[in-house]
Image (cartoon, rainbow, N blue to C red):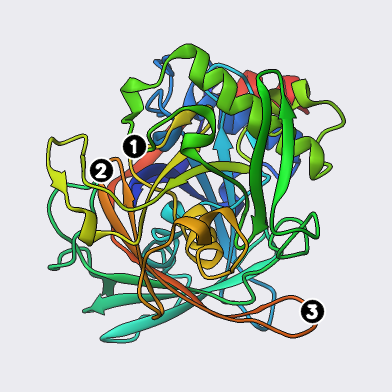
């Protein structure tokens, strides 16, 4: 009798993240059993030594993909942020970096007919109930991974994949401004902090880095334990205000990935993780994003789109630091370099602003395909 069940999978780098992509029919239909299987695939200890996870929030990501039953979508995609050593999976948000690999994966798995030179893949994200259109380069019936497009945080170049987010506002909470305000004040143990909370492709709590004594140009390794705790306290208070949890202290365990916390500051020169210098005139503003209680080494896609839209809305913390000239292009300075977004907003005399454009370009690459093995006992114990 076999001790293991084998599950067909692919490991794909999507943007500045990496994850395991699995077709839905390869996994158990029971969500409880399925989660136990996924956790086994990634490894349940903090090193994820007995699984495919990379012991880092950016490489402990999961994508479940299937043909969509919706008329307005070709593919259904569910994202999971797999906890490292916590035995949890957070389905509370989408991941745009992992999303950038979904279109190529769907084409290469035969779920979407290839069309040269660009195949438009309409992707339904179940986490946010939103549609994203991926423009995927195709040649000879397969997605193209090579090209001359580069993104900071990833070595080399690749094929450009444009992601267009439709009806991006209210992806998690149902409202662009979930609290009804463009600025709020959160009270934490060290005092009050002014924030802006927006929901565009994902829910984000924005704050000025200098409001808690940070420069806003710090690199991931430079934040102290005390500063990380303070930042998580702010994010957790935001989660409480949004109704994600009843008590602030529950957020880290219950909803560690949502809302996101993003720090901003005015444009300035700074040094990247690769010791390159970013000039003040290269960015619209400088930002740092937190990911699973640590600083993101680059910048998230969904959080980045929310940041770009927020920078266009007067009265928000992000708009206060945005020095970009009026246009749809926003360039955000992050620890690994810069990241560009297309964001266009139309303010309304009454009601919420209309988001007319929310788009970003990424690259992806299939790194491995084959089988991952899961102990059969997990299926028995969880059924």
- Residue at screen point 60% across, 37% down: 257
Decide which of tag 3 and tag 2 comes sooner along the chain.
2
- N-term-proximal mark, 1 vs 3: 1
Determine whether the residue tagged by mark 3 lies in a helix, strand or loop.
loop
Q: Position of residue 206 (x, y in %)?
A: 58, 47
Q: Are marks 1 and 2 in contact (CB under 8 Å)?
A: yes
- Cα distance, mark 3 to mark 2? 37 Å
The residue carrying pointer 1 sits among few (fewer than 14), some (14 to 19) or many (20 or more) residues within 10 Å by Cα, namely many
The Cα–Cα distance between marks 1 and 2, rounded to whole angstroms, is: 6 Å
Relative to 161, residue 98 above or below: above
Q: Residue 203: where, in percent of width, then height?
A: 65, 52
The residue tagged 1 is 297
Of 259 and 120, nearer the camera is 259
x then y, percent, for residue 47: 41, 14
At mark 2, the secondary structure is loop
Give me the disc on residue 351: 3
State the mark number for residue 336: 2
Looking at the image, which residue sits at the far right?
246
Task: Find residue 116 and report its image quarter.
Answer: bottom left
Quadrant assignment for the N terminus: top right
At horizontal 57% and vertical 33% (from top left) the residue drawn is 38
Q: Is residue 142 left or right of residue 245?
A: left
């Amino acid at each position: 009798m076999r001790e293991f069940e084998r599950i067909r999978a692919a490991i794909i780098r999507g943007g500045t993240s990496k994850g395991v992509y699995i077709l839905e029919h390869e996994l158990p239909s029971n969500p409880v059993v399925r989660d136990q299987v996924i956790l086994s695939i990634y490894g349940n200890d903090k090193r994820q030594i007995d699984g495919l996870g990379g012991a880092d929030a950016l490489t402990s990501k999961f994508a479940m993909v299937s043909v969509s039953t919706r008329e307005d979508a070709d593919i259904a995609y569910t994202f999971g942020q797999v906890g490292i050593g916590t035995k949890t999976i957070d389905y509370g948000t989408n991941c745009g970096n992992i999303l950038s690999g979904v279109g190529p994966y769907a084409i290469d798995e035969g779920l979407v007919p290839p069309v040269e030179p660009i195949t438009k893949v309409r992707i339904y994200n179940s986490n946010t109930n939103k549609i994203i259109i991926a423009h995927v380069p195709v040649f000879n019936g397969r997605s193209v991974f090579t090209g001359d497009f580069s993104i900071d945080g990833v070595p080399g170049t690749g094929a450009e994949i444009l992601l267009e987010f439709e009806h991006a506002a209210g992806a998690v909470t149902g409202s662009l401004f979930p609290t009804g305000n463009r600025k709020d004040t959160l009270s934490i143990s060290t005092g009050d902090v002014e924030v802006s909370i927006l929901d565009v492709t994902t829910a984000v709590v924005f704050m000025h880095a200098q409001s808690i004594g940070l420069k806003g140009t710090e690199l991931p390794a430079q934040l102290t334990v005390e500063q990380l705790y303070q930042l998580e306290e702010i994010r957790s208070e935001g989660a409480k205000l949004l109704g994600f949890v009843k008590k602030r202290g529950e957020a880290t365990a219950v909803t560690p990935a949502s809302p996101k916390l993003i720090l901003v500051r005015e444009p300035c020169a700074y040094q990247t993780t690769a010791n390159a210098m970013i000039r003040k005139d290269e960015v619209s503003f400088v930002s740092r994003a937190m990911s699973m209680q640590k600083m993101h080494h680059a910048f998230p896609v969904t959080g980045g789109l929310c940041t770009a839209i927020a920078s266009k809305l007067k009265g928000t913390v992000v708009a206060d630091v945005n020095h970009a000239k009026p246009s749809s292009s926003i360039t955000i300075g992050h620890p690994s370099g810069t990241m560009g977004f297309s964001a266009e907003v139309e303010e309304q005399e009454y009601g919420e602003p209309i988001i007319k454009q929310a788009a970003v370009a990424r690259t992806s690459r299939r790194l491995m395909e084959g089988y991952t093995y899961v102990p059969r006992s997990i299926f028995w114990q969880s059924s």
